Image: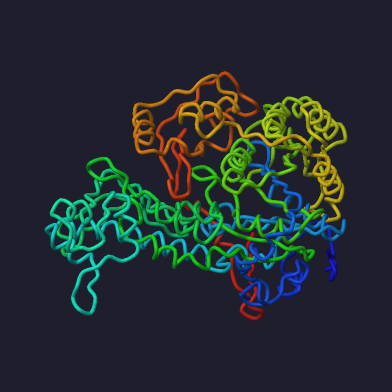
């Protein structure tokens, strides 16, 4: 695999992430491509260290068998951080640079909002990173900008359509919507035929339409109260959460309240991550529902006439970006949907291409957002349904100190010194916290995959505490539990994890099983997921009940479920650590991303536009004017 090894010079104590990233000279991306047998016809270069791998590679490799498929999740997250991205990258560095396996890491593209806000970047950490780290965390190859442009084009089209419908007669509207040829005759264009088909109108000549057909076709009659489509930008800006549009005098009083989401919360991002081909993306973009008509019928992007234009804006974004780790192993970075209102996984097309490129005996390792109850559950029940791919192994990442918190340890606040409970031996606290780990193992094993627990090591961990985690993991049914030090040592610190994962993949024999069938009712699917959380029942608000009836009537009940709940607990209460049970899960509302292909119940209030803290990360970020290198990015 590693025909051109990159020597990683490890020092202690571990320097900052950006200093480590800047200390390594990346290989030219064409050298990374050669490791995967890709030639210059298979990709477009974006500078020296990034390339877009072109979608036709899938067709070219159609006869190639897939490699092993591995997904990385974690225990329920804590403010301490468990290191899923770092583990994903470190494992791949071990597999490729030390165990001589063909391997590709597939990761989500991070939003610039958290990069400049409170979280920082998402390229891994320490000596297990994707490089160039600054390019990974910032503009990359422009995919998020394309999503922003497409999303906002549709938002503009919605308000504009309502404006023009309010000021024109049916015939005038119909006449202006139709195209006129050189002879002055009206005709429909391609996207209009999609609406005609939806309406069941078989006539193809505009002049043959009667008055009723003219009205049905031309007037969408969007109910402003039902519009779910909001504008987006890739910046944390709390003051855009609620805005009023249409205040200008030329808009003739067409004012309404709306707001901005962060770009990665756009349904278009979820479409990108779940699409399987260019044609599939076109269909998904066109059937995105932006609201209802006053008659209660769903209004789509194709009804507005924008589906084709959105696809044009997204035509390059569908190609995954090729990068590299600190030790020269290949990485695909593609898509970055939210992990609460969306499914929190990188793209299907990146995984499909990668599995063909590594081939039999090779490995594709992907990361699922948040804990296993959210990221891996959605990976299995949403992503794997649409991709047709089946993983052999799931990794659950944990740390001793995070397990102590789940065992009843004192509260932790980011940026404040840790309580002594987290830095001195307390086996009882660790054992109590392993209830959280055990439930994640049980739930993940139910899909028919082998589970390997990766314990990210800290200097304060003791042998007794590590032994307690390993014993609890094996008792819960894990295939293995391995201590890792890839943050401090790079791939060398994850060799044991790589060996365990290889054995787990090679010995995987159980059939894959979904948590619920798609033909079950929306309520039954929600309740199946809630039961896996430990809930004893589900309580629906009046609003949620109405929405379930509406989506069922509109024909959307056959979609998978994407639960939007806190990532900090199995329950709806973020303070309920460990493995709570017997609680009633409240469903506040139910919404849908029809183009992406899922229904998402809201367990609590989900912010889709983060704010900036008192001291955002941008305070530390600057440019070295002499070298042109980025400083302070974390």
The answer to whether one can see residue 78 in this image is no
Q: Residue at x 55, y 67 (%)?
A: 139
Count the labels in the image: 0
Q: Position of residue 141 (x, y in %)?
A: 57, 69
Seen from the viewer's position, the closer of residues 238 and 436 is 436
Q: Position of residue 223 (x, y in %)?
A: 24, 46
Seen from the viewer's position, the closer of residues 327 and 612 is 327
Q: Residue at x 18, y 76 (%)?
A: 184
Q: Position of residue 60 (x, y in %)?
A: 67, 66
Q: Position of residue 231 (x, y in %)?
A: 37, 56
Q: Residue at x 76, y 37 (%)?
A: 451
Horizontal side of residue 238 vs 17, given as left or right: left
Seen from the viewer's position, the closer of residues 74 and 272 is 272
Considering only vertical position in the picture, is 612 above or below 73?
A: below
Q: Residue at x 51, y 39 (%)?
A: 562
Which image quarter holds the C terminus?
Answer: bottom right
Q: Quadrant of residue 153?
A: bottom left
The answer to whether one can see residue 521 in this image is yes
Q: Quadrant of residue 54?
A: bottom right
Horizontal side of residue 180 vs 424, given as left or right: left
Seen from the viewer's position, the closer of residues 210 and 396 is 210
């Amino acid at each position: 695999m590693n025909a051109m090894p990159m020597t990683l010079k490890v020092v202690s104590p571990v320097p900052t992430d950006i200093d480590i990233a800047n200390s390594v000279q990346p290989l030219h991306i064409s050298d990374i491509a050669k490791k995967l047998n890709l030639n210059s016809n298979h990709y477009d270069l974006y500078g020296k260290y990034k390339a877009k791998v072109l979608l036709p590679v899938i067709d070219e490799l159609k006869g190639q068998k897939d490699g092993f498929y591995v997904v990385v999740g974690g225990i329920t997250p804590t403010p301490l951080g468990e290191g899923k991205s770092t583990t994903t990258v470190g494992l791949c560095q071990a597999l490729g640079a030390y165990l001589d396996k063909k391997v590709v890491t597939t990761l989500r593209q991070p939003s610039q909002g958290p990069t400049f806000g409170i979280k920082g970047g998402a390229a891994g950490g320490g000596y297990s990173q994707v490089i160039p780290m600054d390019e990974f965390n910032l503009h990359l190859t422009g995919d998020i900008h394309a999503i922003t442009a497409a999303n906002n084009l549709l938002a503009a089209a919605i308000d504009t359509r309502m404006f023009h419908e309010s000021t024109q007669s049916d015939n005038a509207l119909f006449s202006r919507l139709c195209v006129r040829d050189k002879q002055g005759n009206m005709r429909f264009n391609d996207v209009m035929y999609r609406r005609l088909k939806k309406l069941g109108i078989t006539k193809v000549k505009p002049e043959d339409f009667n008055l009723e057909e003219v009205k049905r076709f031309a007037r969408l009659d969007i109910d402003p109260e039902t519009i779910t489509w909001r504008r987006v930008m890739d910046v944390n800006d709390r003051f855009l959460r609620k805005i009023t549009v249409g205040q200008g005098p030329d808009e003739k009083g067409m004012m309404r309240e709306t707001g901005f989401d962060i770009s990665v919360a756009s349904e278009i991002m979820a479409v990108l991550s779940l699409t399987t081909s260019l044609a599939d993306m076109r269909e998904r973009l066109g059937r995105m529902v932006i609201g209802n008509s006053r008659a209660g019928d769903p209004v789509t992007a194709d009804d507005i006439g924008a589906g084709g234009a959105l696809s044009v804006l997204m035509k390059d974004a569908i190609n995954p970006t090729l990068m590299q780790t600190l030790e020269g192993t290949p990485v695909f970075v593609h898509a970055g949907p939210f992990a609460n209102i969306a499914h929190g996984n990188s793209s299907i097309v990146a995984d499909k291409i990668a599995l063909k490129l590594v081939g039999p005996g090779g490995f594709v390792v992907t990361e699922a957002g948040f804990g296993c109850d959210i990221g891996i559950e959605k990976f299995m029940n949403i992503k794997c349904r649409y991709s047709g791919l089946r993983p052999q192994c799931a990794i659950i990442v944990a740390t001793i100190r995070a397990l102590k918190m789940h065992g009843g340890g004192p509260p932790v606040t980011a940026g404040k010194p840790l309580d002594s409970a987290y830095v001195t031996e307390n086996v009882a606290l660790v054992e109590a916290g392993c209830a959280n780990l055990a439930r994640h193992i049980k739930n993940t094993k139910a899909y028919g995959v082998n589970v390997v627990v990766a314990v990210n090591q800290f200097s304060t961990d003791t042998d007794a505490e590590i032994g307690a985690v390993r014993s609890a993991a094996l008792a819960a049914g894990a295939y293995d539990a391995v201590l890792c030090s890839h943050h401090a040592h790079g791939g060398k610190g994850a060799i044991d994890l790589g060996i365990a994962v290889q054995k787990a993949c090679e010995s995987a024999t159980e059939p894959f099983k979904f948590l619920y069938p798609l033909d079950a009712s929306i309520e039954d699917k929600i309740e199946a997921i809630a039961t896996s959380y430990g809930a004893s029942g589900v309580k629906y608000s009046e609003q949620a009940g109405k929405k379930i009836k509406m989506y069922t009537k509109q024909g959307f009940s056959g979609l998978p479920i994407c639960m939007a709940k806190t990532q900090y607990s199995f329950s709806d209460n973020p303070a309920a650590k460990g493995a709570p049970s017997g609680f009633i899960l409240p469903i506040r509302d139910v919404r849908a991303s029809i183009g992406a292909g899922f229904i998402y119940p809201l367990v609590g209030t989900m912010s889709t536009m983060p704010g900036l803290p008192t001291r955002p990360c941008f305070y530390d970020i600057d440019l070295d004017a002499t070298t042109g290198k980025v400083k302070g990015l974390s």
